[in-house]
Amino acid sequence: MGLRFGLLGTGFWATETQGAALAAHPEATLAGVWGRDPAKAAELADKLDTRPYDDVDALLADVDAVAIALPPHVQGELALRAARAGKHLLLDKPIALDTATADALVTETEARGLASVVFFTSRFSDGVNDFLRQAVADGGWHGVRATLFASIFQPGNPYGASPWRREKGGLWDVGPHVLSVVLPVLGPVEEVTAVAGPRDSVHVLTRHRDGAVGSLSVTLDAAPEAGAFSVDLYGEHGWRSVPGGDRSAVEAFGSAVDRLSEQVRTGPGDPCDVRFGREVVAVLTAAQASVRSGRTVRVAEAAGSDPVASA
């Protein structure tokens, strides 16, 4: 029998991606929906042919795992609550907006032997993962040049009304997607220098442990004509472009459910688990600190409670 999931969240992503994928999955059971607005939870539960819950703890008591589709500052605390209740975690990116919460999630899941998956959409497409495995095997990479310019505040975009996206911008929303395909190839980031640019863009230089350097530019408010998504590695092999995902969001989320279920059967450990999610949060935290301070920031120092800029 497959895992019984509780879905936390009632917005567009919860409805069109996570809820749709869970309801259609042949080996998972969508046992219920909880949301901050009970009326929306009831409406979504009816659409997905499941049960609405007014009490999140009651839902946790009835399931094996949770899928969370909520803003990251809300997700982090609810994920901790679920982990402390012994539930496996299928989280959205970023897992939190601070490293303290991300660290706590790592501690709680590891202490309880819980499975975890963080849904970086393209990392659940075979073509992307095959490319990354080959790139790691080839080695010899000097760096990466990446641009992810979205225009979500145009009329009709379902994400444009999201308060947390407007507040935190592309660094925290689409930055994780870029890092999810860069970190496996170039390795851990040690230092970050970042500056803000026009249209709420952020431009980040990363120095990786083995000496590679990344140049990453992101925004959610690009001019519609300037939209772009490219991630290009360069080094001893010349240039190689990281491919885009080869699955729809619903199909990719179904793969994430499969990978969580596999961990439950065989033991925790996934390339996109909460430990990797924590690594992404640490880099984003350092970039945010660099924008504010105007200085290069060491990732290990930014992960502390009082970020310290390097000379």
Image (tube, grey):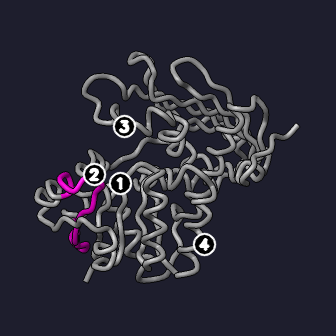
Residue that numbered label 3 is attached to: 162
Instruction: Answer whether labels 3 and 2 touch (C-beta < 8 Å).
Output: no
Measuring 38% from the left and 18% from the top, which residue is drawn there?
224
Residue that numbered label 4 is attached to: 107
56 left or right, relative to 189: left
Image coordinates of residue 163 in percent, x first then y, are 40, 36
Q: Which residues are magenta?
A: 25-41
Label ID, residue 69: 1
Image coordinates of residue 186 in percent, x first then y, are 68, 48
Measuring 71% from the left and 48% from the top, which residue is drawn there?
189
Mark closest to the chain's N terminus, 3 or 2 = 2
Q: Is 76 rendered above or below residue 113?
A: above
Q: Nearer the viewer, residue 27 or 239?
A: 27
Mark closest to the chain's N terminus, 3 or 1 = 1
Instruction: Answer whether labels 1 and 2 touch (C-beta < 8 Å).
Output: yes
Q: Quadrant of the N terminus?
A: bottom left
Residue that numbered label 2 is attached to: 17
Residue at the far right in the pictured view: 311
In what element is the residue under mark 2?
Answer: helix
Q: Amino acid at mark 2?
A: Thr
Residue 237 position by quadrant: top right
Q: CA distance from mark 3 to mark 1?
A: 12 Å
Q: Nearer the viewer, residue 224 or 39?
A: 39
Measuring 46% from the left and 42% from the top, which residue is drawn there?
243
Q: Residues within 10 Å of mark 2 (few under 14, many from 20)?
A: some
Q: CA distance from mark 4 to mark 1?
A: 22 Å
Closer to viewer: mark 1 or mark 2: 1
Q: Amino acid at mark 3?
A: Ser
Q: Quadrant of the C terminus?
A: top right
Mark closest to the chain's N terminus, 1 or 2 = 2
